[in-house]
Image: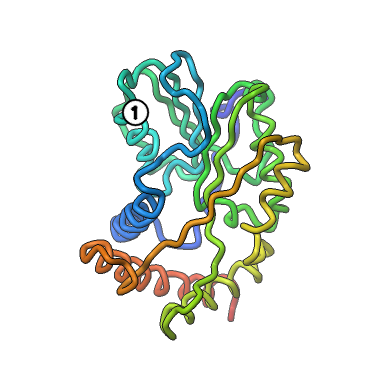
């Protein structure tokens, strides 16, 4: 199938606009998520100190392009010992200057990955990206991602359950909007609870789930994160409403 560079550029299909305000919102979301994970970026039991690993960040522009890769490199005693690949549907977000161990390419996760990438990665990471592949079946997207792993490799998928027990009326309205949008696009709002089964169907073993609460607004004990998370939710709601009206004609 050739390399990613041989593919025709994909047409961006983000639910929200790609601009500075959205980048700031995603950074706030990132900080809340990492805080809920106690600062952990990689959850699988993989020895990142061993040299020569090949690591993929699919949907790498979820904050600023390559942010997850950059943060991972900072946590390693010798960041240059691995090879990092970032892919995203929108190349306009790719950084202009890269370390020699990092590369970026265009890829739409709803499409099959190039055959020369199959069975080549020790770690595949993807975060808050999966529903954007709809109407392609999300189980197919996960199976295609899993095919990129070497035998013994790890895949880390981070997604939201779209549930908020004891939420206030405003946040509940936000969740209802997200559920309605994902249902209309074909992703379904309950996809996160199905991911374990999809991974096992793809051939994964030693599958583990880590469920954490992301504290938004007043529920976050950190005053700075409380303010940032409240603002990022408000910005997301505004963008999702516009998307729903323009694309789905709600």
Residue drawn at point x = 52 percent, y = 38 percent: 125
Percent position (x, y) of residue 160?
53, 59
Specify the quadrant of the image occupied by residue 143.
top right
Q: Position of residue 43 (x, y in %)?
A: 48, 39
Q: Which residue is mark 1?
A: 73
Residue placed furthest toward the left: 224
Q: Is residue 93 left or right of residue 46?
A: left
Is 202 on the left-hand or right-hand side of 122? right
Relative to 245, 140 lies left or right: right
Q: Residue at x 65, y 21 (%)?
A: 116
Relative horizontal placement of residue 38, taking residue 163 as reference (left or right): left
- Expressed as whole percent of the image width and height from the top left, the position of residue 7 reads 60, 32
The answer to whether residue 221 is above or below residue 24 is below
Label 1 element class: helix
From the top left corner, tell me how far across and down residue 58 is, in percent. 52, 39
As displayed, is residue 132 above or below residue 165? above
């Amino acid at each position: 199938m050739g390399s990613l560079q041989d593919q025709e550029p994909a047409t961006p299909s983000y639910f929200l606009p790609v601009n500075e305000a959205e980048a700031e919102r995603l950074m706030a979301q990132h900080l809340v998520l990492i805080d809920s994970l106690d600062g952990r970026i990689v959850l699988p039991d993989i020895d990142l100190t061993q040299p020569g690993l090949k690591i993929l960040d699919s949907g790498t522009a979820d904050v600023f392009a390559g942010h997850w890769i950059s943060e991972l490199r900072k946590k390693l005693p010798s960041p240059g010992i691995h090879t990092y690949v970032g892919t995203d549907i929108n190349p306009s977000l790719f950084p202009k200057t890269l370390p020699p161990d990092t590369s970026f390419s265009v890829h739409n996760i709803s499409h099959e990955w190039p055959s020369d990438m199959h069975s080549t990665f020790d770690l595949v990471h993807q975060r808050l990206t999966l529903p954007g592949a709809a109407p392609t079946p999300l189980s197919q997207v996960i199976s295609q991602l899993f095919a990129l792993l070497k035998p013994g490799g790890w895949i880390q998928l981070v997604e939201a359950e779209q549930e908020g027990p004891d939420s206030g009326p405003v946040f509940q309205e936000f969740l209802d909007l997200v559920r309605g949008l994902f249902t209309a696009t074909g992703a379904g709002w309950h996809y996160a609870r199905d991911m374990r089964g999809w991974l096992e169907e793809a051939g994964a073993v030693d599958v583990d789930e880590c469920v954490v609460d992301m504290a938004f607004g007043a529920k976050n004990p950190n005053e700075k994160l409380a303010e940032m998370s409240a603002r990022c939710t408000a910005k997301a709601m505004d963008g999702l409403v516009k998307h729903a009206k323009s694309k789905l004609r709600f």
